Image (cartoon, rainbow, N blue to C red):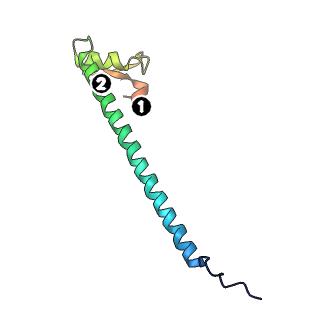
Amino acid sequence: MQHNQAPSGDMSAEQVIATAKALITARSSAAAAQRAIEERRWRIFFLITLMILVIALLAAPAPTLEQKFILVLSGVCAQQHNLFVGGVQLPLCARDTGCTSAC
């Protein structure tokens, strides 16, 4: 006896595959839409945070922009091995800029 034929009322193999492909496509589209919403939320959050940081940098109580950068970056590096270029102290230390003793 062969069981190749589907009983009446059941879907054929081609119909099952087509239905599965349609479900996969619908789920992929829904997941892509959800990712787009999440990415938009993070983008907005990032831009607002960036604007707050720039405003805070400009409002920092330091007389020059150079000193403001040093103030901000003092939490990033130890400020013990700073580079001086043309008599101006760079805000990052030599190790953070990748310079060796030859810089």
In the image, 28 versus 85, the foreground residue is: 28
Identify the secondary structure beneath mark 1: loop
Residue 87 lies left or right of residue 81; in this view the side is: left
Q: Nearer the viewer, residue 60 or 103?
A: 60
User: On the rendered image, what quadrant is the N terminus found in?
Assistant: bottom right
Q: Position of residue 76 (x, y in %)?
A: 42, 21
Q: Amino acid at mark 1?
A: Gly
What residue appears at the point 35 percent right and 33 percent down from the top-left corner? 45
Q: Quadrant of residue 39?
A: top left
Tag 2 secondary structure: helix
Q: Quadrant of the C terminus?
A: top left
Residue 62 showing in the rendered view: yes
Q: Earlier in the sequence, mark 1 or mark 2?
A: 2
Q: Amino acid at mark 2?
A: Ile
In the rendered image, the residue lying farthest to the left is 63
Residue 98 has which mark?
Answer: 1
Q: Which mark is residue 52?
A: 2
